[in-house]
Image (cartoon, rainbow, N blue to C red):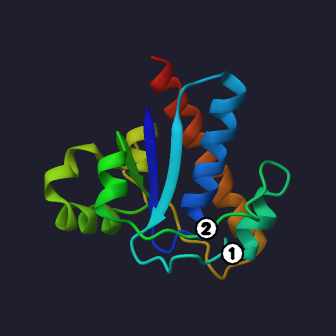
Amino acid sequence: MKVLFVCTGNTCRSPMAEALLRTKAEVLGLPIEVKSAGIFALDGDRASRGAVEAMKNIKSLGEHRANILDLELMKWADLVLVMTQSQLFRISELYPELKDKVYLLKSYALDQNIDIEDPYGGPVSLYKRVRDELNEAIDSIIDKIKG
């Protein structure tokens, strides 16, 4: 399975989600490929300092570079998980032919129609709270994938 996480700038939420799912899939030996992108990303941007700090004991984001969401990535993915309702709406506008594989992350994982807050520019405690929200959702996604 190929999973694509999408947020706004691909420097906080989606790279944290990518790293969490990749790490868990590797430990469990699950055949999951994971990528991340941002709707308004600047290609090559590094992960935010807060995201790097929040993830430091789990998986380093030091090598992460932002990717802008494009048609090639959308076609690559079997499942596209976004952080907010507005991102879901925007992707449905940009790629209407692919909207059936795009879901709000918490809705798909936890049956909660709730956005994941953007921690960009906030304190490390906010990044850690977002990391924990992502971690809970990803545990549920893994359960769904395992069947």
The residue identified by callout 2 is 12
Give the total of numbered labels: 2
Q: Residue at x 50, y 74 (%)?
A: 9
| Image-quadrant location for residue 61 | bottom right
In the displayed image of the protein, which residue is found farthest to the top? 147
Question: Pointer 1: what residue?
Answer: 48
Q: Quadrant of the N terminus?
A: top left
Q: Nearer the viewer, residue 11 or 128?
A: 11
Q: What is the three-letter code of the residue carrying label 1?
A: Ser
Residue 52 placement (x, y as % from top left): 76, 66
SS for dot 1: loop
- Residue at 69 percent across and 66 percent down: it is 127
Which quarter of the rendered picture does the C terminus lie within? top left
**Residue at coordinates 65% horizontally, 49% vertically from top-left?**
19
Q: Secondary structure at mark 2?
A: loop
The quarter holding residue 94 reads bottom left
Q: Return the residue found at the far left.
A: 97
Q: Position of residue 117 (x, y in %)?
A: 53, 67
From the viewer's perspective, is residue 117 above or below residue 30?
below
Residue, far front = 72
Report crowding for label 1: few under 14, some 14 to 19, many 20 or more residues within 10 A (C-alpha): many
Left or right of 144: which side holds 18? right
Q: Which quadrant of the view contains residue 128?
A: bottom right
**Badges 1 and 2: C-beta atoms under 8 Å apart?**
yes
Badge 2 amino acid: Cys
What residue is shown at x 41% (from left), y 78% (from top)?
40
CA gap, disc 1 and disc 2: 6 Å
Find residue 35 and report its horizontal and vertical position in percent: 51, 51
Q: Is residue 42 above or below residue 115?
A: below
